[in-house]
Amino acid sequence: MKKILSVFVLGVGLTAVAGVAANYTLIRSNDGMFFERKSKMGFEDVYYDTRDWGAMEMLKHPDIAAAVAGHGIKKAFSSEESSSVSHKAKGAIDKSRKAAAEGLEKAAEAIKP
């Protein structure tokens, strides 16, 4: 009975690994490793190591290049320092919108007959 149970558990585990390999690509970049969902299911393109890729390799694999760039952008905007900068930028944008709206209101009043 133990043998049957262990074979069953091993089968379920292998099925799960196969499902992940069929639906996701594991990408290793300079920022670490991450999974990217494939556009179509299959066992090709399971793993890419992009740490030493140049421009030509990136051009050959635009979907992988986009995933690496997107992951880098997400990582950059999720750090504490960038969130502080992002908060300051949003504040500056809000102030400029408010100033522009006030300026337009004053210009509209000046134009009225």
Image (spheres, rainbow, N blue to C red):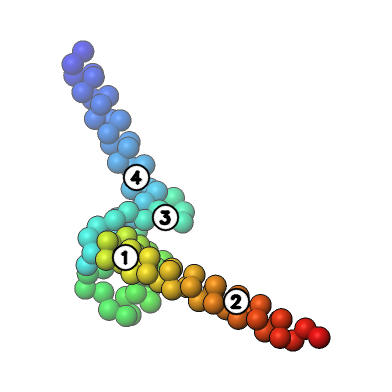
Mark 1 element type: helix
Place residue 110 in its image quadrant: bottom right
Residue 77 percent coordinates (x, y)? 34, 64
Residue under pointer 4: 20
Q: Mark 2 or mark 3, which has the lower sequence index?
A: 3
How far apart are the two marked residues, 3 and 1, measured between alpha carbons? 33 Å
70 left or right of 51 in image: right
Q: Mark 3 or mark 4, which has the lower sequence index?
A: 4
Q: Mark 1 or mark 2, which has the lower sequence index?
A: 1
Q: Amino acid at mark 1?
A: Ser
Residue under pointer 3: 38
How far apart are the two marked residues, 2 and 3, measured between alpha carbons? 49 Å
Circles 1 and 2: CB distance less than 8 Å?
Answer: no
Q: Using the image as rendered, state which of residue 34 and residue 107 is in the foreground.
A: 107
Residue under pointer 1: 84
Q: What residue sits 30% from the left and 30% below the top?
A: 12
How far apart are the two marked residues, 1 and 2, measured between alpha carbons? 27 Å
Place residue 35 in its image quadrant: bottom left
Residue 97 percent coordinates (x, y)? 54, 74
Quadrant, the C terminus: bottom right
Nearer to us of marks 3 and 1 is: 1
Mark 2 element type: helix
Residue 41 percent coordinates (x, y)? 44, 50
Q: Amino acid at mark 4?
A: Val
Residue 32 percent coordinates (x, y)? 22, 60
Q: What residue sits 36% from the left and 56% below the top?
A: 36
